[in-house]
Image (spheres, grey):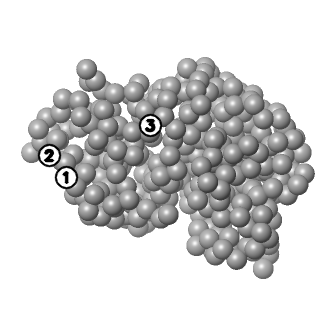
Amino acid sequence: MSVPLCLLSDLTIPGLPEPLLALLVVMHERCDGMVACHCPCAGRVLVVRQAAQLNGCDCGVWTLYALYWRCLKRAIKQDKRHLFADMGMKDPNDALMFRSSSLAVGRP
Amino acid sequence: MVPPLPPKQPLDQMGNSFHGETHQWPSAWKAAFQEVRDLLREQLPGVSLSQFDCLDRGEWLHDDILHLFVDCLKRGIPEPQSDAALGVSPPSQIRDGGNPLLLDLNEVCILDPQHGKIIQLAFETSDYTACLKMLKQNVRFHTAKRILLPLNTSGKRIAMESGSHWMLAELDLTSDEVAIYDWLTGLQMEDYNNLAGASVSGAPACLVHVCSFVLVV
């Protein structure tokens, strides 16, 4: 399925960022200053992993964020094995910080 | 005059979500919010803001959101503080408008989970027609060095339907290496090898070879 997000290009509400674009900024802020890394290697397959999931659903958000992190211009110059350190992961609880429940502003 | 946005509001924009219903916004932003929702309903009938509810904790992240995210990344992602980041601009304006970007889309190619299924199907049937067509549409072969592919997996393979786990594959076209990023330690190393293709030519490594072949041709 192709979702033509570009159709939103006519949107003219001033100062309204795309939700996902803004989400990246929030993720970035929330990940500042944390470290962890575990990286077994096998042949030409490099596995970078960490038991950091608190429930059966967080892997998607982690993948989403890692995708963003490995997209960045600087990614090609970095050691893939340092992904967790680069992303700033240190604790399984950090998985939850990507979830909207912990990001809500002004939630009653 | 629309008041400035609060500093952290992205998920609060999600219409039918808990946050969207309960957050105490200025009335002007409620109106803007309605406008966005109406626009989505009109132009993107397949995308409901309520789909973003899956970003709540304990919820499974749907393919649709990853797809939207990938689509968003393909715009190039302007620097957060740049002018281009303040509004919703067409990809051409973001990429070619002299904006400072976080991504080099000539160097990295981003595929989405649906593409992973096409790759898996090609691997299983040995018919790469659809796969090559997809790659032609999505990969800048003259400059691409890496392909990023979110994997929705089921067991030890890419799921053709709904999977049970997400991980990320990074395919290095210059070194023929595959990196798998996983957030669990449940799989054995040979499972990763099978998934990535080190021992049985799994789908992601197959993609590397296909891309290498196309590059040579």
Do residues under tags 3 and 1 come within 8 Å of each other at their CB atoms? no
Spot the residue most to the front.
Answer: B161
Q: To which residue does mark 1 refer?
A: B35
| Amino acid beneath label 3 | Leu
Mark 2 Cα within 10 Å, few/some/many (few <14, many 20+)?
Answer: few
Identify which amino acid the numbered label 1 is placed on: Glu
Q: Is residue B199 above or below residue B58?
A: below
How many angstroms separate mark 2 from mark 3 (CA)?
A: 24 Å
Point out residue B149 in the picture as x, y percentages from the top left corner.
64, 53
**Label 2 vs label 1: CA separation?**
6 Å
Horizontal side of residue B152 vs B100, given as left or right: right
Total numbered badges shown on the rendered structure: 3
Check chain identity for marks 3 and 1: say if they share one.
yes
Left or right, A38 with respect to B35, comes to right
Q: Which residue is drawn at the image coordinates 68% and 57% (left, top)?
A: B146
User: How packed is label 3: few (under 14 Cα within 10 Å), some, or many (20 or more)?
Assistant: many
Decide: few, some or many residues near mark 1? Use Cα within 10 Å; few <14, some 14-19, many ≥20: some
Q: Which mark is residue B55?
A: 3
Badge 1 element: helix
| Chain to which mark 2 belongs | B
**Residue B209's x, y, as percent?**
80, 65
Q: Label 2, on which residue?
A: B31
